[in-house]
């Protein structure tokens, strides 16, 4: 076992709320979900009721009942054993690597659209690799410093979302305004078809409320603050996503929404061609770029801690547990993350023909393995009620075992459907690069676990 690092308690409810908003509220998710069309607003409402609320309630109970460093890893480990906890943590961590790559690809695409329209795909990949190592540097800082990147990202993100929503409402309210899409009642009726692939990003955009619990021992009062932070961040996330989707669809025809550059196009349409409008669109575009970067820092901070906790338990390779000598932060996990991001960006860049294709391949592959640990989270919530019923629960989901069973299994079914839809497009069949990439990610995790077993058996002073 590795020596446990000393954790400094620096996170209050405000930090936790901003951290969670920064992690979950994703402008790239907004553009992707809007690709479904006007019915995406209906999907946000339906999935908000049947998935978001149950999922948030389970997080509040687990986070306050088991406030352990490592969060999701610790919960699954305690309920199903170290091996399953490790498998889920590997997927959680490796997904972050792939997802960070997709977000940084979007960063490079938006930056190129704004400043360097003729930039080659190779140059964009070089930018993403450089940014990957900047993320590594920031995530090994103490949270007393590092938390300001997620905090600033959350504030800027809310400003950008607010401007987008206000612009969309103003655009729709203009005299003789013609909305870019049909907003009749029939348009809100969900349909099953090729666009179903993008509905998966709605559930994807609702996940991450457990991330702050990975730093539970760095919170001032997790029992009191976790439910408050979940409530306020969930409210902000839901309203921002639904109203932001309306704003995009008011300005841009659904068949013209670009998964990478769609947000800048929307800002330009909403604020008009005047010099003032162009300047506003440029300013907001710059803010969007910062939020993309802050997203990668936020998730790296949380997931590297979960991976380091598993490595400290001897369940993942020892190098991931190496802590920064002064800050106690997960240095080993961060550096390995940087190396893998570099390799993946180069590999996927050689396969893709465009920035948008590269973005979707990385996003979909990361999403498949990202959703799997949440099945473990839901199962851990229900099992905790069965095997540890007498433990004090500062926050308890009402309704007893029956309600706990319904909530956990409802979310598990939804997650399983979303995983399938990320790999299979109705009418088109399986997206094989996503299927193969997901399988390779899982196999790499099994190899890492076996290597950790070998390390445990080997002499430590070798």
Image (cartoon, rainbow, N blue to C red):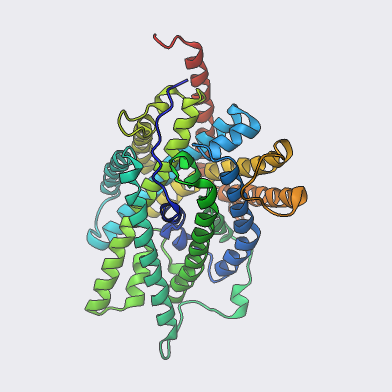
Residue at the far bottom: name it.
175
Q: Nearer the viewer, residue 15 or 278?
A: 15
Q: Which residue is drawn at 61% across and 52% down?
A: 55
Coordinates of residue 315 in the picture (x, y in percent): 52, 25
Q: Reply above or below: 46 against 23.
A: below
Q: Residue at x 48, y 47 (%)?
A: 221
Coordinates of residue 457 in the picture (x, y in percent): 51, 12
Determine whether, in the image, residue 123 is placed left or right of residue 441: left
Q: Is residue 201 visible?
A: no
Among the 4 quarters of the image, the one containing residue 81: top right
Residue at the far right: name it.
402
Q: Can residue 294 be seen in this view?
A: yes
Total numbered labels: 0
Determine whether, in the image, residue 75 is placed left or right of residue 303: right
Q: Reply above or below: 352 against 4.
A: below
Q: Nearer the viewer, residue 5 or 110?
A: 5
Q: Residue at x 65, y 42 (%)?
A: 392
Q: Nearer the viewer, residue 404 or 44?
A: 404
Among the 4 quarters of the image, the one containing residue 76: top right
User: Can you say which quadrant of the picture contains the C terminus?
Assistant: top left
């Amino acid at each position: 076992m590795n020596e446990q690092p000393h954790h400094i308690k620096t996170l209050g409810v405000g930090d936790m709320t901003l951290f969670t908003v920064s992690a979950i509220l994703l402008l790239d998710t907004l553009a992707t979900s809007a690709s479904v069309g006007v019915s995406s607003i209906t999907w946000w409402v339906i999935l908000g009721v049947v998935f978001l609320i149950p999922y948030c309630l389970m997080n509040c109970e687990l986070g306050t009942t088991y406030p352990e460093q490592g969060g999701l890893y610790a919960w699954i480990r305690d309920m199903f054993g170290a091996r399953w906890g490790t498998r889920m943590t590997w997927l959680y961590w490796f997904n972050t690597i792939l997802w960070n790559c997709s977000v940084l690809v979007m960063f490079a695409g938006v930056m190129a659209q704004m400043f360097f329209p003729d930039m080659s795909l190779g140059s964009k990949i070089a930018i993403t690799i450089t940014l990957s190592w900047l993320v590594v540097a920031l995530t090994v800082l103490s949270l007393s410093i590092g938390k300001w990147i997620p905090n600033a990202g959350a504030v800027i993100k809310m400003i950008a979302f607010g401007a987008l929503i206000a612009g969309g409402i103003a655009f729709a309210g203009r005299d003789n305004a013609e909305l870019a899409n049909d907003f009749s009642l029939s348009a809100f009726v969900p349909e099953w078809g090729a666009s179903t692939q993008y509905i998966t990003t709605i559930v994807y955009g609702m996940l991450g409320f457990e991330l702050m619990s990975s730093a539970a021992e760095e919170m001032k009062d997790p029992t009191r603050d976790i439910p408050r932070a979940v409530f306020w961040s969930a409210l902000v996330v839901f309203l921002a996503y639904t109203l932001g989707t309306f704003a995009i669809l008011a300005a841009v025809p659904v068949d013209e929404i670009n998964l990478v550059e769609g947000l800048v196009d929307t800002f330009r349409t909403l604020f008009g061609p005047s010099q003032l409008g162009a300047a506003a669109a440029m300013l907001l575009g710059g803010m969007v770029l910062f939020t993309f970067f802050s997203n990668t820092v936020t998730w790296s901070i949380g997931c590297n801690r979960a991976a380091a906790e598993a490595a400290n338990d001897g369940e993942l390779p020892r190098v991931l547990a190496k802590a920064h000598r002064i800050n106690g932060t997960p240095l080993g996990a961060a550096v390995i993350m940087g190396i893998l991001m570099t390799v993946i960006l180069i590999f996927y860049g050689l396969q893709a023909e465009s920035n948008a294709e590269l973005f979707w391949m990385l996003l979909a592959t990361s999403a498949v393995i990202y959703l799997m640990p949440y099945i473990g989270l839901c199962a851990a919530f229900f099992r905790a009620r069965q095997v540890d019923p007498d433990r004090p629960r500062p926050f308890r989901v009402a309704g007893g075992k029956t309600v706990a069973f319904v909530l956990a299994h409802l979310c598990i079914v939804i997650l399983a459907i979303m995983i399938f839809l990320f790999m299979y497009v109705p009418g088109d069949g399986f997206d094989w690069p996503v299927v193969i990439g997901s399988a390779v990610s899982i196999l790499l995790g099994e190899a890492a676990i076996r290597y950790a077993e070998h390390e445990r058996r080997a002499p430590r002073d070798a």
